[in-house]
Image: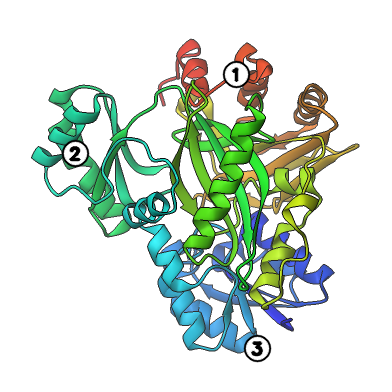
Amino acid sequence: MFNTVLIANRGEIALRVARTCREMGLRVAAVYSTEDRDSAVVRFADQAVCIGPGPARHSYLYLPAIMEAARQTGAEAIHPGYGFLSEQADFAEACEAEGLTFVGPPPAVIDRLGDKSTARAAMADAGLPLLPGTIEPVGDAEAVAKVAADIGYPVIVKAVAGGGGRGMQVVHEPDDLPRQYREIRSTAQSLFGDDRVYVERYLPAARHVEVQVLCDSHGNGVHLGQRDCSVQRRRQKIIEEAPAPGLPRGLVEQMGHAAVRGLLAAGYVGAGTVEFLVDDQSRFYFMEVNCRIQVEHPVTELTHGVDLVREQLRIAAGERLDVSQEELAARGWAIECRINAEDPARGFLPTPGPLTGLHLPGGPFVRVDTAAVAGGRISAAYDPLLAKVCVWAPDRPQALARMRRALAELSVEGPGISTNRDFLLTALDHPLFVAGTHDTSLVDRLTASHPREES
């Protein structure tokens, strides 16, 4: 096992990784931008290094500064958290070149699975079902139009290098396709430096279900059940739960085995997530692989009693999985709500500013992952995620009641700051969500019934 781990991230995930490192007796090294000089992880760490100014491209995305921080702190391993450089094969390669252990899959695996086109090909080869569409990128508008005509509208055009809900466009009518195709290629080039796209059939009312997988470097793999992540705004998740409600047991087992089979076939090592879409006929289709810890990992930890960050570190150190599939049984129900500093009435516009007051919920079986503190500041330079409120209960109705109570306790104060707390409460009370029959259209339903204000 390592002695010192450098955490190449910020906010709640940096603090969450640091806590597990401390519990394992590992020395914690942190990085921070000038914007985050007073952050919680800086105070918690054994050593912290400033890596640049606030904009991420000059700090958390600036690889030379992070590698220098690793040298200064004597780190033997780097944990990338999620976002930023966590799924960059170049970063993993740089770690290898410096003799550092990257806490994640090998660079070649990240490269293959991080590219949506080659990931689809790899999963198809492993026998996972795909939505009708292209595997190889499509090179021109005429080819896209032919594919769309063959598979039927609506279709979704996706950036090969996209992720996090960005770099995709739903097309409902043939006449709109040429313009939207050009727009998504331009957006993909701007966001990812890669304008390649592929096309697949769009399911307007699907369930977004993902499977958590652990694979070691000795060829062993297990899954830790599924999470439902169907409540999304702008295709970014805001409510997640485990297990996914209402899925037939046989389907759950098929998805779990398929996810493990696909990742092992790809040579995966570490914690990874295989994301699926499930249609109204209970058919599932591979969507993508996330080669990192997920924002929503706490719901899996709560239902399975497994510290996923600890497992990441153990696997990265070359240790074998110490649990079998038969031993990994889920207990109870867990729900996570992402508290974002944003205004749902204005299209979920971020609302940064000074945080003058913060009261976090507590009580039985409530977990809050956050790095926010009263007296701090919500920065406009980064994602508006403020906290993750998670609850566990023996069953789903009790988990819903506990989450409603927890959110009612939450109080966030500051000039100009709004949160999505009330919107989350409305979503939790929607009849479709209460019944567990909701899908990815739920937020659209809610926003349609509450027209947005002009900003």
Asked if residue 55 is positioned above or below residue 450 in the image, the reply reads: below
As helix, strand or loop, the secondary structure at mark 1 comes to: loop
Asked if residue 5 is positioned above or below residue 233 in the image, the reply reads: below
Whole-percent x, y for residue 86 in the image: 51, 64
Image disc number at residue 146: none
> Which amino acid is tagged 1?
Thr
Asked if residue 64 is positioned above or below residue 289 in the image, the reply reads: below
Question: In this view of the protein, can residue 339 be seen by the observer?
Answer: no
Q: What whole-number distance in Å separates the C-alpha atoms at marks 3 and 1?
A: 51 Å
- Write down the residue under mark 2: 181
Q: Residue at x 68, y 17 (%)?
A: 434
In depth, the one of 203 and 421 nearer the eye is: 203
Q: Quadrant of the N terminus?
A: bottom right
Mark 1 or mark 2, earlier in chain: 2
Look at discs 3 and 2 and give the one toward the viewer. Answer: 2
Residues at discs 3 and 2 in contact (Cβ within 8 Å): no
Q: Residue at x 52, y 21 (%)?
A: 442
In depth, the one of 52 and 28 nearer the eye is: 28
Mark 3 or mark 2, earlier in chain: 3
- Write down the residue under mark 3: 74
Whole-percent x, y for residue 160 in the image: 31, 52
- Write down the residue under mark 1: 437
Whole-percent x, y for residue 359 in the image: 79, 39
